[in-house]
Amino acid sequence: MNWGSCLYLIPGQPATSAVATFQCLPVLYQLLINAALGLVGILAVILLIFAGMRYITAAGDSKKIEEAQKAVTYVIIGLVIVLLAFFVVGFIADITGVSCIRAFGIGSCS
């Protein structure tokens, strides 16, 4: 689904005055999910760099090294959990044959 299929064109008005309808909600939701996934990826990279800098600047202090290693571990665990959420939905869709659960929106499985 794209934006064009959910916009209502007002008769006699230019296309730039189109009005969004409730059919645009799945498109908007999909865009928000994609943006959130991208943000999570960017945030994970930034946090990994930050934890790496903490590890490098630990100067042999075992407590600081341990904290940096924990930070790296937590970032990787968080990233794996986020990615597993998408893989679980895809796996369930493949096993059950109900592939429409990958599509967002009300009535997408009809």
Image: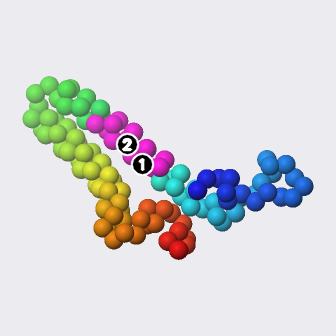
Which dot marks residue 74?
A: none
Quarter occupied by the N terminus: bottom right
Which dot marks residue 37?
A: 1
In the rendered image, residue 43 lying in the magenta stretch gets the answer: yes
The secondary structure making up most of the magenta span is: helix
Question: Which stretch is magenta?
Answer: 34-48
**Is there CB contact under 8 Å for labels 2 and 1?**
yes
In the rendered image, residue 110 lying in the magenta stretch gets the answer: no
Disc 2 residue type?
Gly
Circle 2 residue: 41
Name the residue at 35% across, 60% down: 90
* Viewer-proximal residue among 9 and 54: 9
Measure how far apart labels 2 and 1 are at the Cα level. Answer: 6 Å
**69 relative position to 104: left or right:** left
108 shown above or below 20: below
Q: Does residue 85 appear in the picture of this structure? A: no
